[in-house]
């Protein structure tokens, strides 16, 4: 990186369509490549199609634990070196885990693309999984748990919502899982999990940025083609959570000052037409200051300091979440009532053409700005391919939204946003312990 | 696809090929080398200045059909004093309507085009698709030139802000932020001021208007226009909408730079229920953005705590597993900069983690960093610099920084060169200048049980306690005067309540009372509940809570067996719950304070609702603690606090009873107003009638 040249103004072609190339290695590894030379960087990403829903109910938290463990090193990368190699070569790295997948990435200066591929291939072929690494990362994950859940106001709401919303489906536990399970797990179990899921036939290598495609393809062949195909059976849950006809309601006491309400409504899987209507409904309720809940509940009624509706897209049917924190002196019952009223309004009245047009305009804007960064493009391509079977949705998903009608929004409001199809949690301040 | 398939088949058929491949097997231990360094295109923005002084920078980037306008004000921070919070609120008010648009119209129009529009005291950020660029700029100019702040909107924002302050009382980060601000900068410095419920409450519309009209002027502002737009397009647009914005003289403010503490101090904030301690080591630094040391100092702080290969991260997270992340930073600033190192660690290792922090700070002063470490960090900083360029806003920020901080015009174009020239001796030199382990504040937010272990880190071997807002935590309790013992207090209470001291006469008086029926109305979350309490000598007790004709809960105790029944079902009391009932069911239990098995200690005199009260701690035989307060002037018991255990409510918590409005009933003074605080529920009870000797039957207590 010593030779640095400066030129005036960035010349780039107006490029709205994301071009990409896709193929499969014979060991089953999916490869997606997107070339973009506007900044001399490259995002090297691997999506493993394993998330918390693939876990054994008695060993929850494994997929997330691997998000940590797989930075420990490999046969050719000593403990603690992984991060160091990336950073000392000018890169940044991270990983994240969801119900459905684990995603690892490095963003490197573009002359280090080969290094990124070597690193990811080492991780896929022969990561070190030993007692020392497991022990260290257990402690780190425990601290992560305390920081994100225990010590965070309302931090426990997602696990509490999920465990009440799902009885049969593995979405009943969240990605961080159970610390107890991690403590109980033996080293062999971790190794088994690794050999089962972290294999080329369960992975998508998605690369975006300043790359030379023929060269990158050669490197991919060099580092990934000899990784053996995985042969162990993968747990792909087929269990369907029964349709709900009874509201679940509970109170949680937490270290908070302002009471809050969270509601989870059972909604369809992301790759269904109704998921798009649900997403637009959530947008109608809470995206932007003119959205219905912002305008009515936060501004006019002043019942909340924060209220939001979030579609929570998942591979299997999941939840759409409403989250409201009360304004001073407002009871949580009162806030819940206002949220219910907004939902009822959508259930009864068709939204206006103008409001509908606003939703479409917002989606158009979001779809375009979502492709601003190479790492975002790499992730989107991999996601669309793995969950929807079509990476080109990066360009065409907007059409799916545009198929949604005003009637669809009203219909999904009635079909899924039923009171008897939801979990309601009230968060109330925990009394202060005695001095 | 077809080709790959045929290759796969071919390799299956030609069995011998596998053998041949083995000999050329990839040596995976060889790490790939970088190819030729890429060219970094650091675009230079085009710039022009309007007659009103607004400096405009245009950065073209045609990758996406999107344009953003970001306006930033460059004025000296002001002291907000008793109305702290009004500057931020002024920024929020800007979004609440103009002379031409109501707030709803403003919001509708912004959302309709799918645009982003944020206002704040330091500027406005607006972005939209290219096709809406003119509309969004027109909205921005309307907001800037035609403000129309309204009292009603101010009131709403104040209420929201105060609610926000309340939630932040539970955030360790917010608490630490408050304490650090007040310790590092002091309350006389704009960075040391902290918004409180009171300061926000007192903000006036006039103050906000004055601030807007004084400081939000084009001649101290920069506008960055970034995205799918050319200079030729941008210039007439900006002129059309912002040329008529009037300039004015903006006041200048100077402040005395705060100094680092003379010696290291430990500051502690107790937060109930903490499972982690937040540790933050910090001190003010005199380091401006145009200081030539800055780049070296940035390299130094990256080595120490700049990411997941920094010393702090490797030591505290990777080696010891104390934390999820440990970081440090050096922040330059035109008034006063700061050093900061922080981590959240589990309670038990708080002191161990502080030891490692201090070890890493001191090590920078005694040892040079290694050449490899330095080179690695240089590579990292070079890489992240390239990465930051992906966002065209970065280029605009570079140009604005050059203007704002009076940096050399080649500051960013030579940035990587300057990084590459930093030596290990430079790092040692800047460490000596900017790393001050012996002049730091060690701020810890956590459970006070860990505070004692922090004594050794304080130069004076003491820990100072602070409240959530960074004020000294004052223990309100004063020692009780000589001669005051628990006996004198409790006897005094008896005299006040029963009209005579304990003794035979009182026993005789009370022996005539066989039963008491107390009826109360209670309100809980707006609902009215009827509560009836039955007591029968010597120790039968029953309490029935009902709403209308429906019984919500009933507690009974017949002298031996206690039961609770209600909507959640029935249960028989046992263990601690039963023991407590036994003690409390005694009709005049306060007379038998010495037989109850409690151990009493007078803690002192505490202010309570404008009066003074004695605070007594009593500990039961099983070790449970109860606190009681007795009014110094009247002698009556006014408050009690005990601890209950309830797993559903997350373990231990407190139950508070507040007694007032004592009235005479057959020669005994009883409280007619009782507030019971049980968790988030506050039960306000008003006594409607007290009757004695109505010949209550025993079946009421079963």
Image (tube, rainbow, N blue to C red):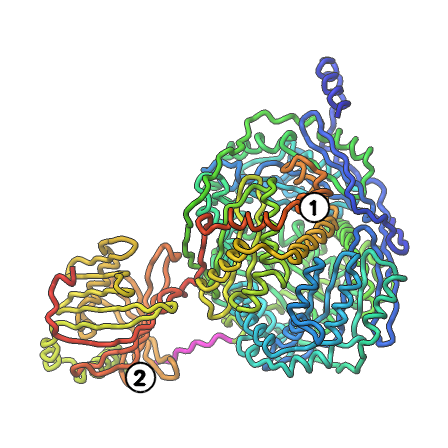
Percent from the top left, x then y, of residue B6?
Answer: 75, 19
Locate residue A179, reporting x and y percent: 47, 45
Left or right for A250, reference B66: left
Q: Chain of mark 1?
A: A
Indicate the quadrant where residue B700 lies.
bottom left
Magenta-span inclusion, residue B509: no
Q: CA distance from mark 1 to mark 2?
A: 73 Å
Residue displayed at 66% across by 58% down: A354
Residue indicated by mark 2: B632
Image vertical order of residue B121 relative to residue A136, above or below: below
Can residue B421 be seen at all in this image of the molecule? no
Instruction: Assign a secondary structure to mark 1.
Output: helix
Q: Main secondary structure of the magenta part?
A: loop
Position in image of residue A152 (x %, y %): 52, 58
Determine which of the numbered discs, if any, sits on residue A398 in the image.
1
Which of discs 1 and 2 lies nearer the camera? The answer is 1
């Amino acid at each position: 990186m010593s030779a640095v040249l400066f030129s005036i103004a960035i010349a780039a072609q107006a490029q709205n369509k994301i071009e990409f190339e896709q193929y499969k290695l014979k060991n089953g590894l999916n490869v997606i490549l997107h070339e973009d030379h506007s900044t001399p960087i490259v995002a090297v990403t691997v999506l493993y199609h394993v998330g918390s829903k693939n876990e054994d109910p008695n060993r929850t938290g494994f997929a997330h634990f691997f998000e940590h463990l797989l930075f420990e090193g490999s046969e050719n990368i000593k403990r603690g070196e992984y991060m160091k190699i990336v950073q000392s070569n000018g890169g940044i790295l991270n990983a994240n885990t969801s119900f459905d997948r684990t995603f690892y990435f490095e963003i490197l200066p573009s002359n280090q693309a080969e290094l990124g591929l070597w690193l990811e291939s080492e991780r896929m072929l022969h990561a070190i999984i030993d007692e020392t690494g497991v022990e260290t990362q257990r402690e780190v994950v425990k601290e992560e748990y305390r920081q994100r859940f225990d010590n965070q106001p309302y931090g426990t709401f997602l696990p509490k919502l999920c465990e009440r919303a799902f009885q049969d489906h593995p979405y009943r536990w969240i990605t961080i899982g159970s610390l107890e399970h991690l403590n109980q797990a033996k080293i062999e179990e971790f190794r088994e999990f690794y050999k089962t899921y972290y294999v080329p036939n369960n992975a998508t290598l998605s690369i975006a940025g300043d790359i030379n495609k023929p060269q990158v393809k050669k490197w991919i062949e060099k580092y990934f083609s000899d990784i053996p195909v995985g042969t162990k059976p993968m747990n792909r849950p087929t269990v369907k959570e029964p349709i709900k006809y009874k509201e679940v309601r509970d109170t949680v006491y937490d270290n908070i000052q302002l009471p809050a309400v969270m509601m989870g409504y059972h909604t369809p899987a992301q790759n269904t037409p109704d998921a798009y209507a649900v997403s637009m409904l959530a947008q109608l309720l809470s995206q932007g200051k003119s959205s219905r809940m912002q305008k009515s509940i936060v501004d006019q009624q002043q019942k909340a300091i924060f209220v939001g509706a979030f579609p929570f897209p998942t591979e299997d049917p999941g939840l759409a979440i409403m989250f409201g924190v009360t304004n001073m002196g407002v009871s949580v019952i009162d806030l819940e009532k206002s949220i219910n009223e907004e939902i009822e309004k959508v259930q009864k009245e068709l939204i206006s053409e103008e409001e509908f047009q606003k939703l479409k305009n917002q989606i158009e804007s979001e779809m375009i700005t979502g492709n601003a960064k190479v790492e975002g493009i790499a992730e989107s391509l991999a996601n669309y391919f793995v969950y929807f079977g079509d990476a080109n949705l990066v360009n065409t998903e907007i059409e799916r939204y545009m198929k949604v009608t005003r009637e669809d929004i009203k219909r999904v409001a009635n079909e899924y946003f039923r009171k008897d199809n939801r979990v309601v949690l009230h968060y109330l301040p925990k009394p202060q312990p005695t001095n | 696809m077809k080709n790959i398939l045929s290759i796969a088949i071919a390799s299956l058929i030609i069995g011998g090929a596998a053998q041949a491949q083995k000999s050329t097997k990839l040596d995976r231990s060889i790490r790939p080398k970088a190819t030729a360094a890429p060219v970094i295109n650091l675009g230079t923005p085009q710039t022009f200045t309007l007659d009103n002084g607004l400096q405009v920078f245009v950065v073209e980037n045609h990758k996406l059909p999107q344009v953003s306008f970001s306006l930033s004000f460059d004025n000296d921070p002001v002291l907000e004093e008793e109305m702290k919070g009004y500057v931020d609120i002024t920024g929020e008010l800007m979004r609440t309507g103009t002379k031409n648009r109501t707030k709803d119209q403003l919001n509708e129009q912004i959302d309709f085009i799918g645009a982003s529009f944020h206002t704040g005291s330091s500027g406005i950020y607006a972005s939209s698709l290219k096709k809406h660029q003119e509309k969004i700029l027109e909205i921005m100019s309307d907001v800037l030139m035609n403000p129309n702040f309204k009292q009603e909107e101010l009131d709403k924002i104040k209420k929201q802000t105060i609610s926000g302050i309340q939630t932040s009382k539970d955030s360790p980060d917010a608490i630490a932020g408050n304490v650090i601000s007040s310790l590092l900068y002091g309350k006389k410095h704009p960075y040391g001021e902290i918004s409180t419920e009171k300061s926000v409450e007192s903000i006036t519309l006039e103050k906000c208007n004055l601030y807007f009209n004084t400081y939000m002027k084009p001649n101290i502002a920069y506008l960055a226009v970034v995205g799918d737009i050319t200079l030729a397009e941008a210039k007439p647009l900006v002129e059309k909408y912002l040329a008529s914005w009037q300039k004015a003289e903006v006041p200048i403010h100077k402040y005395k730079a705060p100094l680092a503490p003379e010696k290291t101090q430990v500051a502690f904030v107790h937060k109930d229920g903490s499972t982690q301690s937040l540790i933050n080591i910090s001190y003010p630094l005199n380091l401006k953005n145009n200081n030539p040391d800055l780049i070296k100092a940035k390299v130094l702080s990256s080595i120490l705590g700049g990411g997941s290969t920094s010393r702090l991260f490797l030591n505290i997270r990777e080696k010891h597993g104390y934390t999820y992340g440990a970081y440090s930073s050096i922040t330059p600033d035109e008034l006063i900069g700061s050093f900061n190192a922080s981590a959240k660690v589990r309670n038990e290792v708080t002191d161990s983690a502080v030891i490692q922090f201090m070890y890493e700070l001191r090590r920078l002063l005694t040892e040079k960093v290694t050449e490899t470490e330095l080179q690695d960090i240089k590579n990292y900083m070079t890489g992240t610099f390239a990465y930051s360029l992906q966002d065209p806003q970065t280029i605009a920020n570079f140009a604005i920084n050059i203007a704002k901080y009076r940096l050399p015009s080649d500051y960013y174009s030579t940035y990587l060169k300057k990084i590459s020239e930093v030596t290990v001796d430079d790092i040692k030199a800047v460490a000596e200048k900017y790393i001050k382990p012996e002049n730091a504040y060690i701020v810890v937010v956590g459970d006070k049980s860990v505070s004692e272990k922090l004594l050794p880190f304080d130069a004076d071997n003491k820990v100072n306690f602070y409240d959530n807002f960074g004020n000294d935590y004052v223990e309100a309790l004063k020692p009780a005067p000589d001669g005051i013992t628990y006996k004198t207090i409790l006897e005094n209470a008896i005299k006040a309540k029963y009209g005579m001291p304990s003794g035979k006469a009182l026993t005789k008086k009370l022996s005539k009372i066989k039963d008491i029926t107390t009826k109360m109305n209670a309100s809980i979350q707006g609902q009215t509940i009827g509560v009836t309490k039955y007591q029968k000598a010597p120790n039968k007790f029953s309490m029935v809570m009902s709403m209308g004709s429906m019984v919500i809960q009933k507690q009974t105790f017949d002298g031996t067996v206690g039961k609770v029944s209600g909507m959640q079902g029935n249960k028989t009391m046992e263990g601690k719950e039963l023991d407590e009932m036994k003690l409390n069911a005694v009709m005049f239990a306060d007379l038998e304070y010495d037989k109850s098995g409690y151990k009493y200690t007078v803690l002192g005199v505490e202010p309570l609702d404008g009066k003074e009260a004695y605070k007594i701690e009593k500990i039961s035989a099983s070790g449970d603690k109860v606190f009681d307060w007795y009014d110094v002037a009247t002698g009556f018991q006014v408050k009690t606090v005990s601890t209950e255990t309830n797993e559903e409510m997350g373990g231990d918590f407190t139950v508070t009873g507040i007694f007032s409005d004592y009235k005479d009933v057959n020669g005994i003074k009883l409280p007619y107003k009782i507030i019971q605080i049980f968790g988030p529920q506050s039960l306000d009870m008003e006594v409607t009638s007290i009757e004695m000797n109505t010949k209550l039957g025993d079946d009421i207590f079963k």
